[in-house]
Image: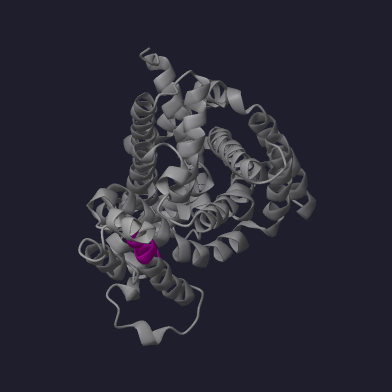
Amino acid sequence: MKQTLKVTDITAVGFMLFAFFLGAGNIIFPPFAGQLAGENLLSAMSGFLLTAVGLPLVTIIAIALAGGSWEHMTRDLPKSIATIMAALIFIIIGPAFAAPRTGLVAFEMAVNPFITSPSPSDLTVFSVIFFGIAMLFAWFQGRLIDMIGKILTPVLFIALIILAVSVFVNPQGEIMQAQNEYLTHPLQKGFLEGYNTMDTFASLMFGVLMVDALRSKGITERRATTKYLISAAFIAAAGLAFVYISLFYLGATSSAVSLGADNGGAILSQYVQALFGSNGQWVLSSIVLLACLTTAIGLISACSDFFSTHTPLPYKAWVLVTGVACAVVANVGLSQLITLSVPVLFALYPVAIALVALTFLRRQFRNPRLAYRFVLIVSLLFALIDAAKVAGLNMGAFNFLPLFDVGMGWLLPTFAAIVVMFFVGQPQNQALAQDNA
């Protein structure tokens, strides 16, 4: 029997994926990057879109083509290594960095402006409430597609459309001159800035969550799952691109209202208040709260789903564990959390990118098992060098590496490793035959 979804259901799946992606980092980083990029807006934005939209889109497609699961995608790696990689990614996008950041950004941008005499306990109380609500939604995993895709996301998207149209119709200043690294290499800087969204990590895991959501709608055949997963990915990518372009332009034209701001949250807040007056903060609060909440729900659900399949604890127990951990970590503070996350992203993002590339090229390798192991080791080793430099260690001995000065010393060695694997290695079927002889 042919399995099909109605257009409304396909749209809901795409909106659900879009809502999962659109969280804290997606809101606070583009305005600041846009302000610093200034006249080099187009180049910087193109680089950012490559990592923040292109890579997540390609990753979801890779998961769909690989069979819809992490296990299919990493079948040429030792099972223990694949599990450790997945666990690390879930810890990063879950309780360690991305999920707590959603609560922190929601508090800083949507709640704190309304508190006349803020105290440290305010963040603690908000964290408990915010992640309590996120856990409640994640608790009913089978109904996520209806609760988020058909209820929360349309409201969020309408608010974003209002903001985007207002930004383009009534910009709050002239486009400024480029600053810092955006002056010399805006494309590469924008590309690296896209790491901060963590969406390539998230897409590796959200793809699996989307397969579960499709299964709850009766889609179980591989061909149908692949088709609808790719459709959802394009809907989500289009939504993300729309948001990023408008937020980059917002930052680039913010000279009259937030010149010299030290973060994207401040730029966005001051810009919205200039556009909408005293009611501007309410508009911004609605957007930020919904965006951060839907992402927190998706992250908690995805993490709980993974760890429940690899430990004796059931899904709902992991929802509680993950949600409580997020609330605790959120009290570290936004600036410190971002600072701690940057070296980790520089170390692991290139490995995720290499894995996605290998998924598309798998059939071209003489020995996929050897190719996967060699290329991922090369990407990790050189990414660790980049990460050490970002962390402040003296890595001057590696200045000879191409693109090392812009934090992408891993790129050409990884590309070279992939090219070598097209020609090196005994075909896998022959190797297996000899092993069994």
Q: Is residue 190 visible?
A: no
Viewed as shown, does residue 349 lie left or right of 289?
left
Q: Is residue 247 visible?
A: yes
Residue 5, given in percent of the width and then of the height, sits at: 40, 16
Region of the chain picked out in magenta, as a range: 370-376
Q: Residue furthest left?
A: 423
| Up-down relation of residue 430 to residue 130 (above or below) | below
Front position in the image: 264 or 359: 359
| Up-down relation of residue 18 to residue 184 (above or below) | above
Front position in the image: 8 or 215: 215
Residue 253 part of the magenta segment: no
Residue in the picture at 49% in, 19% down? 217
Residue in the picture at 20% in, 64% down? 423
Front position in the image: 379 or 279: 379
| Up-down relation of residue 425 to residue 48 (above or below) | below
Residue 368, given in percent of the width and then of the height, sits at: 32, 55
- Image coloring type: one colour
Give residue 125's quadrant in the image. top right
Residue in the picture at 33% in, 44% down? 58
Viewed as shown, does residue 341 lie left or right of 103?
left
Classified by dominant secondary structure, the portion drawn in magenta counts as helix
Residue 263, given in percent of the width and then of the height, sits at: 50, 57
Front position in the image: 165 or 346: 346
Viewed as shown, does residue 70 lie left or right of 130?
left
Q: Quadrant of the C terminus?
A: bottom left
